């Protein structure tokens, strides 16, 4: 039975890891390091690709957008989490909660589609190398990037506005690390069945469909690689795609478990850990995966470093 008291909630309390007070200091230190490494790593990728002309090709320009998204997710989530860990709980206004949910959705959905178009880019480059310049010409690249960002804006606007159109009449404690849709929706004092149908359908379209397209792309890529006569060519192609596939598996796996799970599917602590996987771990690993496993990125980074050293020398 729904709550009858319709007094409006003006703020929420994020509980974070308040069940484990003895771990607050250690978690604060760990998350602070994760935040700094994530922001620094993604910023380096953005700067290197911007400054190095040889990297102004679709593969790296997609990666630049992905790094921008990952920086955005970290900037939205990490400050709030650090405050929670330093105080055990955190009060956040409904406007603040709305804003955080909006940007989490915007960056999350944008990343879903960016990972999808990056898989399409690799599929075109490996399976149709002669036609690739025409398939992925500049106008196509721009349209795919715009589509990814606009999709994120639309989903974030519709979903966040709908969630906060529900009345919240107490309790106001969100047993989570940040204002994510599922835990906030649990506090609504209204029938959310219609929204849940929309959210399920939206998750299928923005998470599962791109993931299946990525999977099909990599199946085709695998067959194309196996047909290559050169062992060196096979190794290079596998290396190029392995980093993307690692990121995709981590991001889509945890995101789909978070948004497609039944309400009683997992314990609150398990839900928190799954949310951390795709909101913090993926942005942390992406720059490490793409820079350390990619020879072009490493060469560009060393080139810029030598240029900087030479300028200081003379």
Image (spheres, helix red, strand yellow):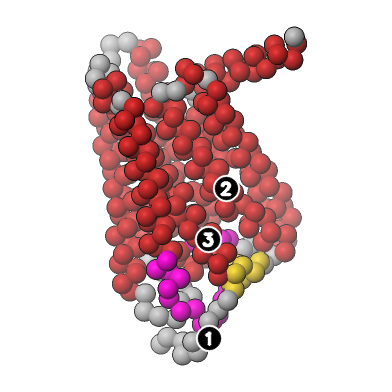
Q: From what the image shows, is residue 171 above or below residue 308? A: below
Q: From what the image shows, is residue 261 above or below residue 43? A: below
The numbered mark at residue 34 is: none
* Secondary structure under the numbered disc 3 in the rendered image: helix
264 horizontally vs 147: left or right? right
- For marks 3 and 2 on the same chain, the one whose residue lies earlier in the sequence: 2
Q: Which residue is mark 3?
A: 99
Q: Is residue 256 magenta?
A: no
Q: Which residue is mark 1?
A: 7
Q: Quadrant of the N terminus?
A: bottom left
Q: From what the image shows, is residue 13 above or below residue 66? A: below
262 or 213, nearer to the observer:
213
Q: Which residues are magenta?
A: 161-180
Asked if one can make out residue 14 in the rendered structure from this viewpoint, the answer is yes
53 or 131, nearer to the observer:
53
* Coordinates of residue 154 in the picture (x, y in percent): 37, 55
* Coordinates of residue 214 in the picture (x, y in percent): 31, 38
Q: Residue 82 falls in which quadrant of the image?
A: bottom right
Q: Is residue 176 magenta?
A: yes
Residue at x 36% of width, y 59% of height: 260
* Secondary structure under the numbered disc 1 in the rendered image: loop
Alpha-carbon span between mark 1 and mark 2: 34 Å
Q: Residue 51 falls in which quadrant of the image?
A: top right
Q: Which residue is mark 2?
A: 74
Asked if one can make out residue 266 in the rendered structure from this viewpoint, the answer is no
* Dominant SS in magenta: loop
Residue count near mark 2 (Cα–Cα under 10 Å), binned few <14, some 14–19, many ≥20 = many
| Residue farthest front in this picture | 139
């Amino acid at each position: 039975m729904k709550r009858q008291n319709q007094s409006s909630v003006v703020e929420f309390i994020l509980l974070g890891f308040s069940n484990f007070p003895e771990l607050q200091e250690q978690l604060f230190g760990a998350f602070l390091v994760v935040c700094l490494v994530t922001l620094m790593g993604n910023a380096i990728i953005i700067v290197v690709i911007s400054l190095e002309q040889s990297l102004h090709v679709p593969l790296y320009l997609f990666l630049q957008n992905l790094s921008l998204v990952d920086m955005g997710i970290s900037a939205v989530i990490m400050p709030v989490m650090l405050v929670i860990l330093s105080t055990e709980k955190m009060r956040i206004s409904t406007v603040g909660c709305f804003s955080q949910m909006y940007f989490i959705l915007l960056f999350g959905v944008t990343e879903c589609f960016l990972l999808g178009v990056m898989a399409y880019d690799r599929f075109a480059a490996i399976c149709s190398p002669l036609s690739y310049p025409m398939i992925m010409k500049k106008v196509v690249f721009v349209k795919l990037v715009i589509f990814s960002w606009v999709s994120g804006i639309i989903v974030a606007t519709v979903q966040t506005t709908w969630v906060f159109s529900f009345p919240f009449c107490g309790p106001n404690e969100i047993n989570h690390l940040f204002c994510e849709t599922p835990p906030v929706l649990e506090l609504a004092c209204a029938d959310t069945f219609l929204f849940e149908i929309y959210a399920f359908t939206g998750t299928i379209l923005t998470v599962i469909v791109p993931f299946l397209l990525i999977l099909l792309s990599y199946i085709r890529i695998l067959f194309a690689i196996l047909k290559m006569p050169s062992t060196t060519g096979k190794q290079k192609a596998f290396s190029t795609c392995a980093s993307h596939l690692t990121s995709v598996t981590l991001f889509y796996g945890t995101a789909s478990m978070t948004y497609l799970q039944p309400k009683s599917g997992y314990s609150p602590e398990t839900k928190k850990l799954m949310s951390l996987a795709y909101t913090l771990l993926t942005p942390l690993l992406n720059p490490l995966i793409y820079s350390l496993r990619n020879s072009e990125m490493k060469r560009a980074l060393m080139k810029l470093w030598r240029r900087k050293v030479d300028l200081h020398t003379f």
